[in-house]
C-alpha cells in the first residue's frame, strides 16, 4: 500500500548544505521511501495525501554511542575525572542490572526518552549482565526502535561484582547471538568496554566471535590522557588503535569507536584505512574534561565521524543537543587552532542523521530507496511567520524539545 504525507521535507544529501523540498510529498510503501517530490506524479494522483500543513518532515536522529545502563546517572558525579567517575559511580549502578525488575524499569525509561527526543536508532552499551542485556534487547524490540545492543565485556581492572571471566562472556555472547539472530531492527554488537578492562586473550576471543558471526564492534578509544597512559602501561607501547586492530576489532567488521580524541598519525592512517567510524560525544568531552575531539582534522583525513550522547558521560539524551554542542565545540577549538574550520550546522546535523543512520543501512536520508524513518516537527506559529524552512530546522535543533516532535515513524510505522 502506498502512503503519502505532505510538508516541508528537509535532510542532508551531503554535509555542506540542507536539501529542502518545500510543500513536498513524501511517498512510501511499507518500510521504504519511494519518492520525494514537489509535484505529485501522475500515477499517485488518485491516492489520498495526508497534508500535515506547515510542518517540517526530517530524518530521525541516530545516536552512535550511549550507555543504556547509565541513564539514571546523567548529571551525577560530574566533578570527577573519567577513571574515578567509573569507579565511584558507574560500576555501582551497572551492577544493579543483574536484578531484572531494575533493568526493566530503567531500560523502559531509557527507550521512552530516546523516542520522545526523536532518536530512532542507537548503538547502545548495556552492562556486563547477560539478563540485563537481554532485557535491553527486548525493550528495544518491544518499543520498535532500531538498535545495536552490546553486552559490556570486562575481564579485569573493575570490581569483581561486575567483571566476568572470558569463558562466561563468550558463552553469554553465543546465547545472545542465538536468541536474536533473526531480528531485523535490533542487532547484537561485540562490546569490549575498553582496552584497560580487557586482556590480549579477551580481545582475541571477541575478535574471533565477531568474525565467526559477522558481528559489528563498538568500544572506547583514546578518550583521556590518563586512560591512554594506562593502556600503554598494561599493553606496552603499541598504539591503542593497533591493539584493537591486532585482535580483529578495528574495521574488519563495521566498527564504532567512541571519543578518539587523541589519535596519533599512525592511528589516523589506520582508522581511515579500516573505515572505522569514530563517534564524537561533545557533551561527554566537556563533562569528563577529556579534551575536544578535532573533528575537522579527522574529516580532512577522510576519517568517518559520527555523533553520540555518551549517556551518562553526556548528561542529555537529546541528539539535537549533541548537534548543537558539536558545532559549539568545533568553534571553540577553531579559536585555538584556526586551521580547523568550525563545523557548519548542516555538517553537525548530517552527522546526527545521515552519518548515524548509515550505520543502520539505508537510513537517515529522506529519499527514494531509504527506510521510511522520519520525524514531523511542528514549531511555533511565530517562527513559521518569521523564518525560512532552513532557519526553522536550525531553530528546532537549537531550542526545540520533545514537544515540537508531533510524529515519529520507523520503517513506515508510526510509534
Ligand atoms: N571508558 C570506559 N568505560 C566508559 C564509560 O562508561 N563511559 C565513558 N565515557 N568512557 C568509558
Ligand atoms: Fe562511553
Image (spheres, rainbow, N blue to C red):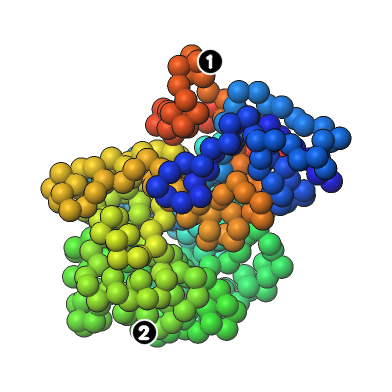
Which residue is tagged 1? 381
Q: Position of residue 320 (x, y in %)?
A: 44, 39
301 or 379, which is in the foreground?
301
Spot occupied by residue 78 in the image (x, y as percentages of width and height) = 27, 43
Residue at 40% x, 83% y is: 247
Q: Is the residue 390 above or below the residue 250 in the image? A: above
Q: Residue at x 73, y 45 (%)?
A: 28
Which residue is painted at 15% across and 51% down in the image? 337
Question: Who's the residue at 77% across and 48% down the image?
Answer: 29
The answer to which image quadrant residue 193 occupies is bottom left
Residue under circle 2?
Answer: 246
Local secondary structure at mark 1: helix
Rendered image: mark on residue 33: none
Marks 2 and 1 in Cβ contact (< 8 Å): no
Rendered-image quadrant of the C terminus: top right
Residue 38 appears left or right of 380: right
Q: For numbered disc 2, what is the local secondary structure? A: helix
Q: Residues within 10 Å of mark 1 (few under 14, many from 20)?
A: few
Q: Nearer the viewer, mark 2 or mark 1?
A: 1
Quadrant in the rendering for residue 237: bottom left
Amino acid at each position: 500500500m502506498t502512503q503519502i504525507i505532505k510538508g516541508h521535507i528537509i535532510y542532508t544529501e551531503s554535509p555542506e548544505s540542507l536539501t529542502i523540498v518545500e510543500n513536498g510529498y513524501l511517498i512510501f510503501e511499507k518500510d521504504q521511501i519511494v519518492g520525494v517530490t514537489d509535484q505529485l506524479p501522475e500515477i499517485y494522483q488518485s491516492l489520498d495525501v495526508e497534508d500535515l500543513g506547515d510542518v517540517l518532515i526530517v530524518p530521525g536522529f541516530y545516536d552512535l554511542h550511549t550507555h543504556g545502563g547509565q541513564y539514571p546517572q546523567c548529571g551525577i558525579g560530574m566533578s570527577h575525572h573519567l577513571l574515578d567517575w567509573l569507579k565511584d559511580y558507574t560500576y555501582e549502578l551497572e551492577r544493579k542490572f543483574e536484578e531484572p525488575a531494575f533493568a526493566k524499569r530503567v531500560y523502559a525509561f531509557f527507550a521512552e526518552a530516546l523516542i520522545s527526543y526523536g532518536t530512532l536508532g542507537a548503538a547502545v552499551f548495556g552492562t556486563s549482565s547477560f539478563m540485563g542485556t537481554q532485557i535491553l534487547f527486548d525493550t528495544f524490540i518491544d518499543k520498535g526502535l532500531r538498535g545495536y545492543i552490546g553486552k559490556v565485556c570486562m575481564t579485569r581492572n573493575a570490581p569483581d561484582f561486575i567483571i566476568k571471566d572470558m569463558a562466561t562472556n563468550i558463552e553469554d555472547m553465543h546465547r545472545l547471538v542465538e536468541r536474536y539472530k533473526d531480528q531485523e531492527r535490533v542487532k547484537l554488537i561485540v562490546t569490549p568496554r575498553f582496552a584497560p578492562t580487557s586482556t590480549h586473550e579477551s580481545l582475541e576471543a571477541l575478535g574471533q566471535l565477531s568474525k565467526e558471526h559477522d558481528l559489528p564492534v563498538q568500544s572506547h578509544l583514546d578518550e583521556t590522557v590518563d586512560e591512554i597512559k594506562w593502556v600503554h602501561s598494561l599493553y606496552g607501547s603499541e598504539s591503542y588503535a593497533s591493539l584493537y586492530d591486532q585482535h580483529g576489532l578495528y574495521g574488519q567488521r563495521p566498527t564504532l569507536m567512541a571519543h578518539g580524541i587523541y589519535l596519533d598519525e599512525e592511528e589516523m592512517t589506520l582508522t581511515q584505512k579500516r573505515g572505522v567510524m569514530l563517534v564524537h560525544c561533545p557533551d561527554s568531552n566537556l563533562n569528563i574534561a577529556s579534551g575536544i575531539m578535532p573533528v575537522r582534522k579527522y574529516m580532512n583525513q577522510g576519517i568517518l565521524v559520527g555523533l553520540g550522547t555518551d549517556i551518562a558521560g553526556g548528561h542529555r539524551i537529546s541528539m539535537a543537543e549533541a548537534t548543537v554542542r558539536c558545532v559549539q565545540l568545533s568553534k571553540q577549538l577553531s579559536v585555538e587552532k584556526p586551521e580547523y574550520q568550525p563545523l557548519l550546522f548542516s555538517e553537525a546535523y548530517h552527522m546526527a542523521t545521515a552519518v548515524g543512520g548509515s550505520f543502520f543501512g539505508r537510513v537517515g536520508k529522506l529519499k527514494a530507496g531509504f527506510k521510511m524513518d522520519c520525524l514531523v516537527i511542528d514549531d511555533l506559529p511565530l517562527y513559521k511567520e518569521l523564518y525560512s524552512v532552513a532557519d526553522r530546522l536550525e531553530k528546532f535543533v537549537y531550542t526545540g524539545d520533545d514537544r515540537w516532535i508531533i510524529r515519529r515513524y520507523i520503517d513506515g510505522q508510526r510509534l
